[in-house]
Image (cartoon, rainbow, N blue to C red):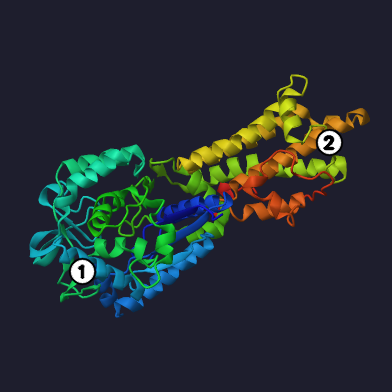
Amino acid sequence: MSKPTFYISTPIYYPSDKLHIGHAYTTVAADSFARYKRMKGYDVWFLTGSDEHGQKIERTAKEKGQSPLEYVDQIVAGFKSLWKKLDVSYDDFIRTTQERHKKVVQDIFQKLYDQGDIYKAQYEGHYCTPCETFWTEYQLDADGNCPDCGRPVEILQEESYFFKMSKYADEILKYIEDNAEFIQPNSRRNEMVSFIKSGLADLCVSRTTFDWGIQVPFDPKHVIYVWVDALTNYISALGYGTGDDSLFRKYWPADMHLVGKDIVRFHTIIWPIMLMAAGIELPKQVLGHGWLLLDSGKMSKSKGNVVDPLELCDKYGVDAIRYYLLRELPLGSDGYYSEEALVNRINIDLANDLGNLISRSTSMIVKFSKGVLEEPETPREPVLLEQYLGSEEAPAEDRDLISLALKTKYEVDDLMERRDISGALAAVWRLVGRANKYVEETSPWSLAKDPELRGRLATVLYNLAETIRFVTVMVTPFMPNFPSMVWQQLAIGNQPELHVWEALEWGNLPAGTRVVKGDAIFPRIDLKTLEKE
């Protein structure tokens, strides 16, 4: 029986000299969904890449004395270095300068032209080069600047090809209204419905004032404008329309396009209308997440307020940065970044809560049980365990801890299916908190003093170790480096069958396991010392 498939993509990033921590959020979040689905037994395809054409690239490369391709080659190397640093497990990296992409874009453009959905006309309007976006006069901000980035726009007049977006306005509106999960969260969905109802203009899809792009196949003086070019990557990467379209037939339609809220409109209006016109099935969902903001507003290179994720990873560790990003940004909402908030999150959640639970539990197992997990009094056979958890004779603290561990597995599943990573992590940390409380309730150090309570001590220590295993399995998609350190301390590194989602059944940790006390996985950070350094 074949595995169910899951295709997730991030937007292909526009080349910039420096990617900031906001970009890192999108890709780390997508990676977490991909890793989670793999753990759940799915055949996953995870796509990211780079959008490398356009006037801005051509101008910047010229200023640097380079060809556009030389310029973007350097930037792409930086992208890949960052994703490697952040342990992003993508399956493919698509570049819009690759031949496999160009041919598909040209074929779709030709198809839309042949069926009368693309026509030639004269264009005059306001154009923002950094955003690669045309704006009508009423869309500009109060100062007459680009409403997205606030920079000045140019008045452009040129011959262009246009795509008949207006022709498909009713069809896309009906699709969005009939498919509630297509645009998430609902706030983004409502915004897009309102935008469509305000009236869709036809879309400019070619330019003649620069050369750096994919040529219109039947009119080489025109290059295909950015959104038709860039958005097609989601199917060109799968070999759509080529001699080998096996990946397309296997994975399309995409299960999720994960994008920032600023480009939801392009992914939920322009892209699906292009697909409708071309007779291609639409993606199942576009999830538009919020921004990670600074006090000075949205991060951008031009504002000089970019936070470099590479520097943060070197300073605090990759898993700590991944955890902070994923925990700090609730589904659909904006979050605020500060280094103080980052350090507090590391100290409280990772060092105090999770790190301390692991450290004190392994220390007590080593000290009170010579490092060996003894057989607990709690039954481990599922039917007997269920009876035990329903019995008032069993210690209340044991029933609470084990029941919560089993419940948390399903809660994380539910939250991940609802695309709420922050909520899933919060659920796991409730279990971490309950385990720390369990230590205080059971006082293993007191039990160790009474030989007659040896069985109770063995049960408490086992429950702590098994809870740590549950937590570690559940955070694996979010913090991929952390688990190996825990498996080493629990001495189950060579038992991968205990590391998987299916192993989240209570009592799978073998008795007789010899636990090893290791170094602190998440040491506390002294912010004052850090500031001095």
Query: Can I make out residue 531 in this image?
Result: no
* Residue under the image location 15 percent in, 46 percent down: 142
Camera-side residue: 75 or 114?
A: 114
Q: Earlier in the sequence, mark 2 or mark 1?
A: 1
**Where does residue 480 sit, x and y in percent of width and height?**
59, 54
* Residue under the image location 33 percent in, 66 percent down: 51
What is the residue that sits farthest to the front in this orientation? Answer: 1
* Residue under the image location 30 percent in, 69 percent down: 104
Q: Nearer the viewer, mark 2 or mark 1?
A: 1
Which of the labelled discs sits on residue 110, or is there none?
Answer: 1
* Residue under the image location 78 percent in, 49 percent down: 517
* 492, above or below 53, in the image: above
Is residue 189 left or right of 146 when viewed as pictured? right
Mark 2–mark 1 Cα distance, whole angstroms, equals 72 Å
Is residue 353 left or right of 309 when viewed as pictured? right
Check disc 1 and give the amino acid type: Gln
Camera-side residue: 109 or 60?
A: 109
Check disc 2 and give the amino acid type: Ala
SS for callout 2: helix
To which residue does mark 2 refer? 458
Is residue 279 left or right of 18 when viewed as pictured? left
Q: Quadrant of the C terminus?
A: bottom right
**Where does residue 500 sit, x and y in percent of width and height?**
64, 50
Question: Residue 349: which quarter of the image?
Answer: top right
Q: Quadrant of the N terminus?
A: bottom right
SS for callout 1: helix
Callout 2: few (<14), some (14-19), or many (20+) C-alpha neighbours within 10 Å? Answer: many
Camera-side residue: 114 or 160?
A: 114
**Where does residue 374 sit, x and y in percent of width and height?**
85, 40
Give the total number of marks visible in the rendering: 2
Query: Can I make out residue 253 in this image?
Result: yes
Callout 1: few (<14), some (14-19), or many (20+) C-alpha neighbours within 10 Å? Answer: some
